[in-house]
Image (tube, grey):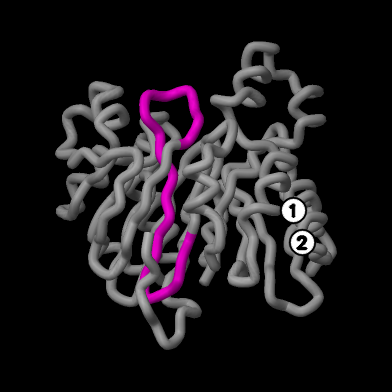
Amino acid sequence: MTHAPSADAKSQLKIHILASGSKGNACIVESVSTKILLDCGISYRELTRRAAALKLDISDVAATVVTHEHSDHTAGLSVWCKHFDGSLLATKGTATARKHLAALPFEYIDHDADFEIGDIRVGCFSTSHDVVDPIGFRFESHGDSIGYCTDSGMLTQAAIELLSNVRILALETNHDPKLLAQSHYPLFLRERIGGERGHLSNEQACDALAALVTQKTEQVIGMHLSQENNRPRLAVQALSCVVDAIPQNDMGTRAGTSDGLLHIVCAAQDAPLTIK
């Protein structure tokens, strides 16, 4: 993907995380003139309530893109589409994977698609999850960039290429391996979560940071945390070790480098958050 020129690339893009976790996911990527909804796994009522809490107007969302068909990413999509007249985009595998999705007016995109929505360029890459054809994204606008990847048991080379050298990196830190191993989950579920078609652990996210974080990176967001098998403090602590960040609050749920150039935080299931 090419980078659009800009005199000032800072804060051309922001991400509003309305929900992140196994009970529902929804984010909005916003540029100077365009908004894109990423997944809709919460109800329309919750979507609008949480957007209002962030003072975010969602009446002008230009497009909705869907990562994959699991209900925590699509449960609210049918009702949302009744209030939304923009483009609805997903891979054919995702769009046809379930009956209620097949009834929606999807436009199909390839898992390596590269296209524009308003002033945002969207690059897609395959993720590794136990669904038909899941994807992650890189968003670019006026020289600014956001990388987004959740629900992936490993990172493909294409994912690493598109997630690297972004200003805001939203990367799955689903579970702590020790907590997962000690959890009450049955063995098959623990193996699924920890497998190559499951979810990235704190440690896997840390391993990836070495390749993904550059001098351009200002924000790292731990995404899709398991409420049973992870803690924000553990995820932030693990990510901090890679970039030499230090805690910024007593609970250890925020961290930053001593020069103030890189910040780490975790997204939550029920507390909307804007990162810019």
Q: Residue 42 in the image: state x and y as whole percent.
A: 41, 43
Taking the magenta stretch, the answer to whether it contains residue 131 is: yes
The quadrant in which residue 138 appears is bottom left
For image coordinates 41% across by 29% down, the residue present is: 70
Decide: is 187 above or below 176: above
**Taking 72 as reference, is 188 left or right?**
right
For image coordinates 34% across by 38% down, the residue present is: 111
Q: How many marks?
A: 2
- Between 99 and 153, the one lying in front of the other is 153
**Taking 259 as reference, is 141 left or right?**
left
User: Over which residues does the magenta segment extend?
Assistant: 127-146
Residue at disc 2, secondary structure = helix
Query: Which corner quadrant holds the N terminus?
Result: bottom left
For image coordinates 79% across by 65% down, the residue present is: 245
- Between 85 and 89, the one lying in front of the other is 89
| Mark 1 or 2: the one toward you | 2
| Residue at which label 2 appears | 243
Amino acid at pointer 1: Leu
- On residue 239, the disc is 1
**Taking 173 as reference, is 11 left or right?**
left
Q: Are marks 1 and 2 in contact (CB under 8 Å)?
A: yes
For image coordinates 59% across by 51% down, the residue present is: 268
Q: Residue 34 in the image: state x and y as whole percent.
A: 29, 68
